[in-house]
Image (cartoon, grey):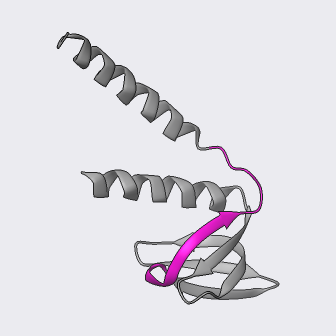
Amino acid sequence: MANDKSRNLQELFLNNVRKSHASVTVFLVNGVKLQGIITWFDNFSILLKRDQHVQLVYKHAISTIMPMTPIQLQELDEDDSASNSASDSASDGDL
């Protein structure tokens, strides 16, 4: 179940930066820093575009993806508040 939640967070994050055309910095596990715009992604890779060049980057090589500007993950906030209120009401019955 934790894997499903992390996959949903990853998909939410990547979709957000893709749709907003936000510039990102991608840090690889070997220390290389790539910059560009994520134009596409799947379970195993992302496409990073910069200056008319496109790079296919495998996710297993990525350490961190950092957007250049703040992003809003509104769906995440709604999901968290719904799960928190459900767990709060469940724990109230234990008192």
Q: Position of residue 14 (x, y in %)?
A: 56, 61
Q: Which residue does the image show at 47% across and 59% down from the upper left? A: 10
Classify 17 as above or below 64.
Answer: above
Q: Position of residue 22 (x, y in %)?
A: 74, 61
Farthest residue to the right: give it: 51
Q: Which residue does the image show at 43% across and 34% down from the upper left? A: 79
Residue 3 lies in quadrant: bottom left
In the image shown, does 76 or 38 lie closer to the viewer? Answer: 76
In the image shown, does 64 or 43 lie closer to the viewer? Answer: 64
In the figure, is residue 79 to the left or right of 73? left
In the image shown, does 93 or 1 lie closer to the viewer? Answer: 93
Q: Which residue does the image show at 36% across and 29% down from the upper left? A: 83
Magenta stretch: includes residue 60: yes
In the figure, is residue 6 to the left or right of 12? left
Q: Position of residue 6 (x, y in %)?
A: 38, 56
Classify 9 as above or below 34.
Answer: above
In the figure, is residue 94 to the left or right of 59? left
The magenta segment: 59-72
Residue 67 lies in quadrant: bottom right
In the image shown, does 21 or 10 lie closer to the viewer? Answer: 10
Magenta stretch: includes residue 16: no
